[in-house]
Image: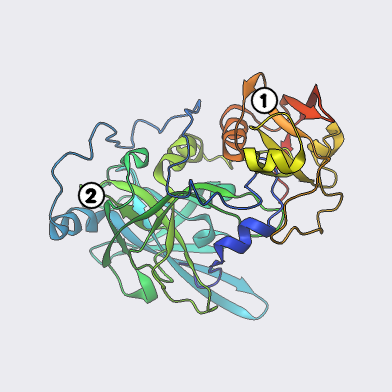
Amino acid sequence: MHLRSMLAVILASALVSALVAIAVVNVWPDDNDSSQAATSTTANTSPAPAVRSNDQASLDSSCLAASDIYESLRPSVVAIISTTSSRFGQSEGEGSGVIIDETGFILTNYHVVSGADSLEVTLADGSTLPATLVGRDPGNDLAVIRIDPPAGGLTPTTLGDADKLRVGDPVFALGNPFRLEATFTEGIVSALGRTYSPGSGTRPVRNMIQTDAAVNPGNSGGPLVNCRGEVIGINTLLENPTGQSVNVGVAFAVSVNTAKLYLADMLDGQTISHPWLGIAGRELTPALAKDLNVSVTEGVYVVTVAQNSPAQRAGLRPALQSENETLNDQAPPAGGDIILTVDGKAVTDVDELAGYLDSQKRAGDTVALGVLRNGQETTVTATLAEWPS
């Protein structure tokens, strides 16, 4: 991962403390569903034709030997050095990337290249080439950079389908930790559908893949692949309870299916924005419904509403009146709105609501929320904004 901007993850506390705007995360993680993949939604964008993709392969297909995976994947993985200048001099950060087409496009993490004055890519044969930032999706920590192909050409990787993963499936990571080029590690899928929020008020990254494959600083942006050598994730961050930048066996990758949703736009040079509603919510369960003494047992309970957010302007009512209030282990108090539908479609949990907004809406669009308030159903219309930077 990028040493300059290494992300220290403490997943549980991030889920509790992050005020997220819907897209939202649960105020508490749902332990019962943490190993299940989040529901995927088809977006209106698709990867450019130059990107190879193999979505038809089944997990029942024969797996390759680890050595064969390495040999086929190695030419597609690069090292990335970013250089940033300041009045104190120059600083360097490093990461990894994966070649996704023959014309020189490389997929990596946004935090690997963010803020860099110059980028340099080292190919598998040791040659180095300058690179330029093409497109970015800061909300999902993804970016596309480009190099001019060398005379010998480039070997692009194959993008797989992360929705076909199961907990326990073997996976492999290839990257450049600590500038140890082409380091290959093996593990399994430890969990699916993880949500990570970098901090209060920041957009959470959803549907992440958790693995115990060893990743360390310098691995960020490199591929996580299945047993057929198909890229199913971009290695992004690791659990870091000690505060030290070392692997402890819990790492997270952005799903390649998330990248596919926005890849065509990034290849076109765009910066991806995501719609912001401005709430933190919790899935309404029968137990919570009993505590709140409400008649419904499914929906999204609005716990907090961000100041100056679309939700606040629309009049959504939260259970807590301040973003600074904390629940600790207590149930939220009664009085908040319960979101039952979005544009007429029933929603049963936070990720379902967030996924709909992220895939079907843009900043400036309106959304009709069917809510239960004081025992009565009503409709609240909100005009979505861009996630605040």
Check disc 2 and report the residue beneath it: 229
292 in relation to 4, above or below: above
Which residue occupies 81% across, 43% down? 334
Q: Viewer-nearest of labels 2 and 1?
A: 1
Pick whichever, 130 or 279, lies toward us: 279
Label 1 is placed on what type of residue? Val
104 in relation to 352, above or below: below
332 in relation to 339, above or below: below
Check disc 1 and report the residue beneath it: 342
Which residue occupies 74% across, 34% down? 338
Describe residue 342's horizontal placement relative to residue 46 as left or right.
right
- Coordinates of residue 181 in the picture (x, y in percent): 30, 70
For mark 2, give the secondary structure.
loop
Instruction: Count residues near mark 1 (Cα–Cα under 10 Å), then give few for <14, some for 14-19, many for 20+.
Output: many
Dividing the picture into quarters, in which one does residue 121 lie?
bottom left
On residue 244, the disc is none
Dividing the picture into quarters, in which one does residue 114 lie?
bottom right
Extreme residue toward the top, this view: 344
